[in-house]
């Protein structure tokens, strides 16, 4: 931070990002130079073979060229190590060194061509060792050149030119100016188009219709708005996440205030209710996991799943009227049977149809719990990801429901699709005709959990005894009024530091603000932060005591202002406001606050290593408030805690522990 300016445009790389890659290339170049020097010294005066004269000149020029490159790389690494993330002033000479290094690529390219021609010349008959070394030199040169080109493509920012032009024009910062307003509009429009092209490229393998085009534009606007107000490069974000994780771990090691610790006596009604819900959740989580079909079954049984599915794929299959969508070789349905333990006749309807806003689900009879279960699948395809990312808010208005409010747009449309299938196609009527005394239970994990929650709200009036279990649902789902309303019939289950359960636009804005603040206030070089962070994430240990403020910082030493504060886009974001003045934190939110549905069971590890390789994990569960999930927590397990197999393992562990206590 800020992004490096070269050739009149900004790039997605900082001036302090050349330490580690530069040091690696420097090591390779030094070893290479020593090897060529040894080769030249040993064979000096022996270049009398056919083509030896050219070889002699080639090696001499290569030694000089490598020495020049080594000097340039040494200077780049040395300069890039200076300063801090927020103080690029000591690195102001780096662009000149990079221009010098780039100029050296031209003779290197020419000499790589000369070497390739010499090696491929059939008339050359020199010593085999020399030929092999020259061949290796040519290959190494081309590998470095190719990787350099790939690196330039990766760090290229399509908006770099417009950002630089805009920042260089100090007069245009006056928002009252029509020229400034038009320029800002052009930058925003270009940014939206760039993001839309990126999304289309990622989704090039799926059939695109009007719904996709609308979703692409909406998601592109979302990304543009989120990333437009800071000049953070990817390595800045990585360093910020590392610092936040260590700061967070230091905070967690501090003793909690008494009011933060919730305790229930073993015989309290709250504990009894929790134990009952945990038992039900452990049971119904099998249905939510089964909705993923064969990918989940193979993931949890990597060595035996294919054999079992191949043996049973032709055994039982519902009639064509019971199933919609593609299920080649019957693997999906076979996996559902294996995971749930049900018989084929227990399934009322199965849908594997998958489009944007239309996700797979199945309806089955659960005789053990005497329930009609609607299980909704979570994210498993590009279409599902587009549904997740359609995060605009829309009103949910239902008859006889006073607590109308905002909901997640994409997930609501997915719930509407399943609602129409269940009601208009008579699926639920068919199920209750078979089992009229059964109750309705809706379950799902991740995207499926969010869809199940909104579907439960839609069906609540028609089925007053309805129950919903949402496993790891998205955090930005319901407005406060709807979240409070759903506490009567929805139970959400969250494990550990699950990222998805904390995902909402306000939380993402808060994370961006915290990253900008912590990297702006750390006086360590970025390479030290990243090296120490990698060691901490892999091997553990005590959090490093990185300073959180620039003690004694002399403002005159900052030869360039913080571009995270001097926003690239003229408007001031919450991140900018947070750094400039704490009073701005009380300004109206950019996005409405959305919350998790229903009552929340939070499952945490009782005692285990914080590293990924921990074993013999024990869990504890407690009722939690939605405010606990109002901030994204950084952890190596923030992704794995969301996985359905981890959720099922935690629930089974708690259910078995409760069963053992009862038997005792």
Image: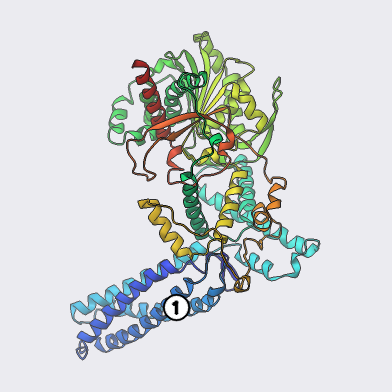
Side of 180 where 662 appears, left or right: left
* Residue at the image point whose x is 54% and y is 74% from the top: 90
Q: Quadrant of residue 146?
A: bottom left
Please tell me whether residue 296 is drawn above or below residue 37 in the rendered image. Answer: above
Q: Nearer the viewer, residue 278 or 658?
A: 658
Q: Nearer the viewer, residue 11 or 573?
A: 573
Please tell me whether residue 352 is drawn above or below residue 126 in the rendered image. Answer: above
Looking at the rendering, in which quadrant would you find the N terminus?
A: bottom right
Q: In the rendering, at what x and y percent does residue 2 appear?
A: 58, 65
Disc 1 secondary structure class: helix
The residue under label 1 is 75
Side of 95 where 40 appears, left or right: left
Q: In the rendering, at what x and y percent does residue 450 appear?
A: 56, 32
* Residue at the image point whose x is 29% and y is 87% from the top: 54
Side of 339 where 250 appears, left or right: right
Q: Quadrant of residue 187?
A: bottom right
Q: Quadrant of residue 651?
A: top left
* Residue at the image point whose x is 71% and y is 57% from the top: 571
Q: Is residue 491 in view?
A: yes
Q: Nearer the viewer, residue 367 or 478?
A: 478
| Residue neighbourhood size for the residue with mark 1, other residues' Cα within 10 Å, grouped as few (<14), some (14–19), many (≥20) | some
């Amino acid at each position: 931070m800020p992004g490096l300016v070269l050739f009149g445009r900004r790039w997605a790389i900082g001036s302090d990002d050349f330490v580690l890659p530069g040091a690696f290339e420097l090591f390779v170049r030094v070893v290479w130079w020593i090897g060529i020097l040894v080769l030249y010294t040993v064979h000096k005066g022996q270049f009398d073979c056919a083509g030896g004269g050219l070889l002699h000149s080639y090696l001499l020029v290569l030694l000089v060229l490598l020495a020049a490159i080594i000097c340039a790389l040494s200077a780049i690494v040395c300069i890039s190590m200076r300063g801090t993330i927020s103080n690029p002033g000591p690195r102001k000479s780096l662009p000149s060194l990079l221009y010098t290094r780039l100029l050296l690529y031209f003779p290197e390219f020419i000499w790589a061509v000369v070497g390739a021609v010499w090696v491929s010349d059939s008339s050359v008959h020199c010593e085999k060792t020399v030929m092999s070394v020259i061949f290796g030199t040519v290959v190494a040169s081309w590998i470095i050149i190719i990787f350099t080109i790939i690196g330039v493509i990766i760090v290229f920012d399509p908006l770099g030119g417009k950002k630089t032009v805009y920042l260089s024009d100090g007069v245009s910062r006056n928002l009252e100016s029509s020229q400034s307003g038009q320029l800002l509009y052009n930058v925003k429009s270009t940014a939206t188009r760039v993001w839309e092209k990126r999304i289309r490229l990622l989704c090039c393998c799926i059939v695109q219709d009007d719904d996709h085009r609308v979703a692409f534009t909406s998601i592109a606007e979302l990304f543009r708005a989120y990333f437009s107000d800071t000049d953070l490069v990817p390595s800045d974000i990585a360093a910020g996440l590392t610092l936040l994780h260590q700061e967070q771990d230091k905070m967690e090691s501090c003793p909690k205030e008494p009011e933060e610790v919730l305790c229930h006596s073993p015989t309290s009604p709250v504990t009894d209710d929790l134990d009952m819900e945990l038992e039900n959740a452990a049971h119904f989580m099998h249905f939510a996991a089964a909705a993923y079909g064969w990918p989940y079954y193979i993931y949890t049984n990597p060595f035996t799943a294919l054999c079992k599915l191949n043996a049973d794929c032709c055994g039982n299959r519902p009639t064509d009227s019971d199933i919609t969508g593609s299920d080649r070789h019957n693997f999906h349905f076979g996996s559902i049977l294996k995971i749930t333990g049900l018989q084929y006749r227990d399934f009322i309807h199965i849908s594997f149809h998958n489009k944007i806003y239309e996700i797979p689900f199945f309806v089955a009879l659960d005789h053990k719990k005497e329930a009609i279960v609607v299980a909704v699948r979570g994210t498993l395809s590009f279409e599902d990801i587009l549904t997740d990312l359609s995060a605009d808010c829309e009103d949910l208005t239902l008859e006889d429901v006073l607590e109308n409010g905002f909901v997640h747009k994409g997930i609501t449309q997915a719930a509407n699709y399943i609602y129409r299938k269940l009601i208009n196609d008579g699926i639920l009527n068919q199920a209750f005709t078979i089992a009229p005394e059964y109750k309705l239970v809706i379950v799902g994990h991740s995207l499926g959990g969010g869809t199940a929650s909104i579907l439960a709200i839609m069906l609540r009036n028609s089925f007053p005894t309805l129950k919903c279990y949402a496993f790891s649902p998205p955090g930005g789902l319901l407005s406060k009024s709807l979240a409070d309303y759903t506490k009567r019939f929805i139970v959400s289950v969250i494990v550990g530091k699950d990222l998805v359960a904390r995902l909402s636009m306000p939380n993402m804005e808060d994370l961006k603000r915290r990253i900008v603040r912590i990297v702006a206030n750390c006086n360590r070089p970025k390479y030290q932060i990243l090296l120490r962070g990698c060691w901490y994430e892999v091997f553990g240990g005590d959090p490093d005591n990185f300073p959180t403020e620039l003690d004694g910082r002399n403002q005159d030493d900052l030869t360039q202002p913080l571009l995270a504060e001097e926003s690239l886009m003229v408007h001031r974001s919450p991140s900018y406001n947070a750094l400039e003045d704490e009073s701005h934190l009380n300004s109206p939110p950019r996005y409405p606050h959305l919350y998790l549905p229903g009552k929340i069971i939070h499952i945490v590890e009782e005692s285990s290593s914080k590293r990924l390789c921990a074993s013999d994990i024990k869990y504890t569960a407690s009722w939690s408030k939605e405010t606990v999930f109002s901030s994204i927590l950084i952890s190596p397990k923030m992704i794995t805690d969301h996985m359905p197999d981890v959720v099922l393992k935690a629930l089974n562990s708690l259910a078995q522990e409760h069963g053992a206590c009862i038997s005792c």
